[in-house]
Image (cartoon, grey):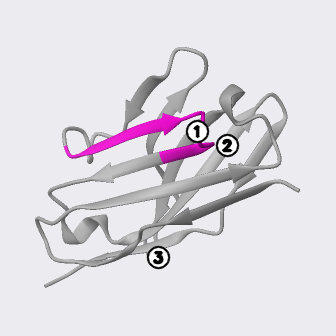
Amino acid sequence: QVQLVESGGGLVQPGGSLRLSCVASGFFFRYYDMTWYRQAPGKERELVASITYPTDTTNYADSVKGRFAISRDNAKNTVYLQMSSLKPEDTAVYYCNAAFADDDFWGQGTQVTVSS
């Protein structure tokens, strides 16, 4: 069955770094647009970064430009989110999304907490 499994979240101090991973299974990963979203307590879910098939064009929220980088490894069915210079306002649950035609798959999320 379709699965998206995120990992790599945790507690980090302001200015620190984390790398999130999302491993996909059950569908042809390489053909899907992959997106990281996040949702902070009391706020709506927002797009963080995306990488699209077939050109691997990337797109970022203004709030993370220059600090976050999205990448994918089609051989490993994995999409990554490298997060640097983390701020307390980056605290949220981060979700992985895969989209293609009518397909729209979500992972269960991984918590990122930025605090001293």
Tell me the quarter of the picture where residue 28 sits. top right
Residue in the picture at 58% in, 38% down: 34
Choose the circle earlier in sequence order: 3 or 2.
3
The residue pinned by badge 3 equals 42
Specify the amino acid type for callout 2.
Ala
The answer to whether marks 1 and 2 mark residues whose Cβ atoms lie closer than 8 Å is yes
| Residue interval drawn in magenta | 67-79
Q: Is residue 7 left or right of residue 76?
A: left
Residue 91 percent coordinates (x, y): 33, 71
Residue in the picture at 60% in, 35% down: 75
Q: Secondary structure at mark 3?
A: loop
Choose the circle earlier in sequence order: 1 or 3.
1
The answer to whether marks 1 and 3 mark residues whose Cβ atoms lie closer than 8 Å is no
What is the C-alpha distance between the residues marked 1 and 3? 25 Å
Q: Secondary structure at mark 1?
A: strand
Residue in the picture at 82% in, 39% down: 103
Residue in the picture at 50% in, 53% down: 37
| For residue 84, above or below residue 50 | below
Specify the amino acid type for callout 3.
Gly
Nearest the camera: 18 or 90? 18
Q: Main secondary structure of the magenta part?
A: strand
Q: Secondary structure at mark 2?
A: strand
| For residue 35, above or below residue 32 | below
Magenta residue check for 48: no
| For residue 7, above or below residue 67 | below
The residue pinned by badge 2 equals 98
The residue pinned by badge 1 equals 34
Magenta residue check for 76: yes
